[in-house]
Structure formats: structure tokens, C-alpha cells
């Protein structure tokens, strides 16, 4: 009898943002912030460049994971994530994309197993390049601008001091939700993620 070695089943956790120091603290970069928090918490370094992304690979809670920060600008991010998914043979249900959402109040988070782009250019690019919208996503609320400010300008501004406190809490909760996603799956992660921290 011939025993075949089981291929690794990779989980890809990708945060969305724009590359470059000027964008680092922007509202649009909250996905990058989440990946940075995870890499710090897990003592990992995103030092490898692959498929136009900074990545690291590791094992966490018995799962083989890839953390990724695509280095394309937002409207082309799909090419990077699709390339990584193909290379590591990531099933769409084992891909989790973390990104900012204008339609959620600042600091609120929501996880979903699938869905549309909701007007987010990065998500639109990913759906187009993957050829499916059936992959999990974690949305971190950044709220909408006051008055008549163009949302395109708003997302490229940094969080103010009050918002930064809410985002800090959201990022800590996001870490817990991602770990639950890896260890127990999407349903358990949604149960944790989609209720308030005090509920």
C-alpha cells in the first residue's frame, strides 16, 4: 500500500490597505493594521515578498496559515490575492479578507461567509479575479464622513483620537474572531464576531 503525504491545507488571512508610509494610519488601511496586530501577537514578521504582497507563513493552533498585506493599490488587490490563492491552493472558504467598511459605525465589526463588494474597490477587484464572491470577509467599521466630504477623501484620512480608541478595541476583537475562524470555523467565528463585546 502506498501512503501519500497529505498536502497542507492553507488558510490565507489577507488585510487590505494601500502601501507606503503616507497611507499607514489611514482609515482605508485598517485591514493592514489588523494583519500587523496579528503578526505582532504571534511573533511573526511579514518579511517575504510574493505575488506582489508581503507575507509570512506559520502554524497556529494546528493550522497552516498565510498572513498577507498586498502591496498593490486597492483597485488592483485582486491580482495579488488570486495569485497567492492559486499558489497555495487555498480553498475560497479558507480565505479571510479583512477590510474597512463605510457602512458600519466606527469600531463595529462583522464577519460574513460570502457577499458582494458593497462599493469597496478592493473587494470588487478580489471578486473579479477570484471569479467568486463566496469567501469569508471581516469588515471593520470606519463610519461615514460628516457633511459633504467625498468618501474617497475621507478614507484616506487618519483616524482622529476618539476614533483611534474605538479602532484599537475593534482590532483586538478582530484578533479573537480570526483565531476562532481558524480553530472552529466560520459559524463559530460569526457568533463571536457579530455580537457586541458586552453581549
Image (cartoon, rainbow, N blue to C red):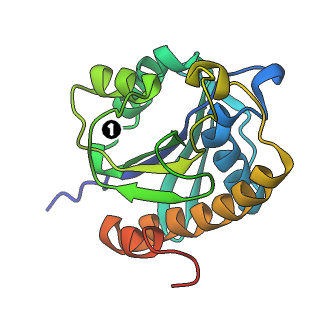
Could you say where residue 83 lies in the image, as x and y percent from the top left? 41, 23
Q: Is residue 71 left or right of residue 179?
A: right
In this picture, is 157 found above or below 36?
above
Q: Which residue is mark 1?
A: 89
Query: In this view of the protein, which residue sits in the foreground, 125 or 89?
Result: 125
How many marks overall?
1
Graded by Cα atoms within 10 Å as few (under 14), some (14 to 19) or many (20 or more), the crowding at tag 1 reads some
Left or right: 70 in relation to 95: right
Pick out the residue farthest to the bottom: 199
Look at 44% across and 30% down and name the residue there. 84
- Quadrant in the picture for the N terminus: bottom left
Residue 90 vertical placement versus 108 (above, below): above
- Please tell me which residue lies in front, 11 or 107: 107
Give the residue displayed 47% in from the left and 68% down from the top. Answer: 193
Q: Position of residue 97 (x, y in %)?
A: 45, 43
Q: Is residue 58 left or right of residue 156?
A: left
Point out residue 132 in the picture as x, y percentages from the top left corner: 21, 32
Residue at position x 60%, y 23% in the image: 148
Q: Quadrant of residue 176?
A: bottom right
The answer to which of 159 and 36 lies nearer the viewer is: 159
Instruction: Tell me the SS state at disc 1.
Output: loop
User: In the figure, 117 relative to 37: above or below?
Assistant: above
Which residue occupies the extreme front position in the image? 147
Q: Looking at the image, which residue is at 62% across and 57% down?
A: 107
Q: Residue placed farthest to the left in the image?
A: 1
Q: Where is residue 81 drawn, in percent x and y?
A: 44, 28
In this view, 40 is above or below 27: below
Amino acid at each position: 500500500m502506498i501512503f501519500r503525504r497529505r498536502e497542507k491545507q492553507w488558510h490565507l488571512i489577507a488585510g487590505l490597505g494601500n502601501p507606503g508610509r503616507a497611507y499607514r494610519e489611514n482609515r482605508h488601511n485598517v485591514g493592514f493594521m489588523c494583519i500587523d496586530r496579528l503578526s505582532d501577537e504571534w511573533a511573526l514578521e511579514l518579511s517575504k515578498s510574493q505575488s506582489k504582497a508581503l507575507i509570512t507563513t506559520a502554524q497556529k493552533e494546528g493550522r497552516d496559515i498565510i498572513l498577507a498585506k498586498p502591496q498593490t493599490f486597492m483597485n488592483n488587490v485582486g491580482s495579488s490575492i488570486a495569485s497567492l490563492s492559486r499558489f497555495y491552493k487555498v480553498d475560497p472558504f479558507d480565505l479571510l479578507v479583512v477590510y474597512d467598511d463605510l457602512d458600519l459605525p466606527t469600531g463595529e465589526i462583522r464577519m460574513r461567509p460570502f457577499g458582494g463588494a458593497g462599493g469597496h474597490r478592493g473587494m470588487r477587484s478580489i471578486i473579479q479575479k477570484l471569479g467568486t464572491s463566496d469567501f469569508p470577509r471581516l469588515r471593520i467599521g470606519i463610519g461615514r464622513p460628516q457633511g459633504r466630504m467625498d468618501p474617497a477623501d475621507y478614507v484616506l484620512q487618519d483616524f482622529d483620537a476618539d476614533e483611534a480608541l474605538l479602532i484599537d478595541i475593534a482590532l483586538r476583537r478582530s484578533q479573537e474572531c480570526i483565531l476562532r475562524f481558524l480553530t472552529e470555523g466560520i459559524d463559530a467565528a460569526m457568533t463571536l464576531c457579530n455580537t457586541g463585546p458586552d453581549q
